[in-house]
Image (tube, rainbow, N blue to C red):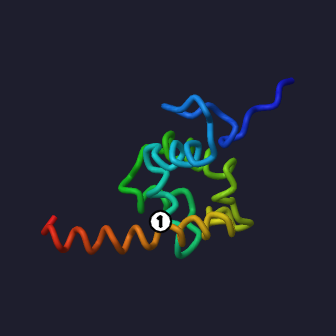
Amino acid sequence: MAKRPTTAERSVRGSRTGRPIMALLDLLGRRWALRILWELREEPLTSRALRSACDEASPTVLQARLTELREAGFVELGAGGGYGLTPLGRELCETFMPLHRFAEKWRNKNGA
């Protein structure tokens, strides 16, 4: 039985190289991926709570993203049944905080 490639090993849309940055941006660019990480940044959530926090995203898409984010090492399923960020997932969210602050500043400046 062939081993299933991990998210980081899979082909990357729009890239022939499969470089890590391209694989990461491909994963994070998928529908609901960033939103899931954002909603888990403060506390673990059950599937139901996460779906509600994600504006009632399709359960099928939500589960697909959770599987991909778990395979990538950013999200884990806790003992209590809730999904939470791994240390790597927390580091990724911390990496995005300067971009979040910039986006808030940009929105306020442009009245968006």
* Residue 39 spot, x, y in % from top left: 47, 65
- Quadrant the C terminus occupies: bottom left
Q: Is residue 11 above or below residue 50?
A: above
Q: Is residue 12 above or below residue 83?
A: above
Amino acid at pointer 1: Glu
Q: Neighbour class for label 1 at 10 Å: few (<14), some, many (≥20)?
A: some
Is residue 98 toward the left or the right of residue 80 in the image?
left
Extreme right residue here?
1
Q: Is residue 96 above or below residue 1?
A: below
Residue drawn at x 62%, y 62% as measured from the top left = 83
* Residue 1 spot, x, y in % from top left: 86, 24
Q: How many marks?
A: 1
Relative depth, front residue between 96 and 41? 96
Is residue 26 toward the left or the right of residue 8 in the image?
left
Relative depth, front residue between 36 and 87? 87
Quarter of image, res 94: bottom right
Task: Read off the residue under disc 1.
Answer: 39
Relative depth, front residue between 83 and 33? 33
Residue drawn at x 48%, y 31% as measured from the top left = 14
Extreme left residue here?
111
* Residue 60 spot, x, y in % from top left: 51, 39
Mark 1, secondary structure of its residue: helix
Residue drawn at x 69%, y 59% as measured from the top left = 77
Residue drawn at x 68%, y 60% as measured from the top left = 76
